[in-house]
Image (cartoon, rainbow, N blue to C red):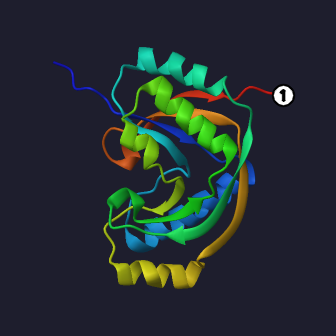
Amino acid sequence: MEKTATYSLWLEPMGDTAYKLQQRIKELSKKYDTPVFSPHVTLLGGLTASKTELVPLTDTLASSVAPFDLKLTKAGYLNTFFQSLFIHIEQNEGLTYLHNNACRLFDCPEEYEKEYMPHLSLLYGDLSQQQKEKILNNIGRKFYIRFTAKKVVLMDTDGKPGQWKKIHTAMFKQG
């Protein structure tokens, strides 16, 4: 029997912002020997439906919203591998609407809808609090980065970050 893949929905920065964030992620990953990954804001994770079901749902979701701005604010960290070091995203009407609509379309558990903490990770790994504090002392704790979310990306997030694959990109409606 074939193993079920796990998928995630991401919002990705583009252009110069994406490049600068990618460089920061690469630098930190190299220095701390942690996985490299693309800069993104996870909208939903842990999706286990088939690709044939998820692609049209992703298109439907993208067609429900116009591009909107995301503002990265302050650094944070948790004691989890995938939220080791990150930048908080300020909640706004566009993001709240998109996340709630995604939860409705993709039938996510109610607690996931309520516990959503939008962020953009800078580092995955098992680092100590002391190491994370040292990194933040070097890179800063406040960020003034904005980017316009223009698309939602369906990612196959099975395995390690280096094995993740982009499955489908759906652009937000224009105008």
* Residue situated in front as seen by the camera: 89 or 151: 89
Is 97 displayed left or right of 124 in the figure?
Answer: right
**In percent of the image, x 66 and y 25: which residue is there?**
64
Is the residue 26 above or below the residue 101 in the image?
Answer: below
List x then y, in percent, for residue 141.
58, 77
**In percent of the image, x 44 and y 26: which residue is there?**
106
* Residue situated in front as seen by the camera: 108 or 175: 108
Is 112 displayed left or right of 105 in the figure?
Answer: left
**In percent of the image, x 53 and y 50: which residue is there?**
38
**In percent of the image, x 67 and y 22: which residue is there?**
63
Other residues around mark 1 within 10 Å, as few (<14) / some (14–19) / many (≥20): few
Is 51 displayed left or right of 96 in the figure?
Answer: left
Is the residue 138 above or below the residue 35 in the image?
Answer: below
List x then y, in percent, for residue 175.
84, 28
Quadrant in the rendering for residue 126: bottom left
Is the residue 29 above or below the residue 147 in the image?
Answer: below
Give the quadrant of the N terminus: top left
List x then y, in percent, for residue 19.
66, 55
Q: Amino acid at mark 1?
A: Gly
Q: Which residue is mark 1?
A: 175
Is 174 displayed left or right of 92 in the figure?
Answer: right
Quadrant in the rendering for residue 85: bottom left
Mark 1: secondary structure:
loop
List x then y, in percent, for residue 97.
62, 37
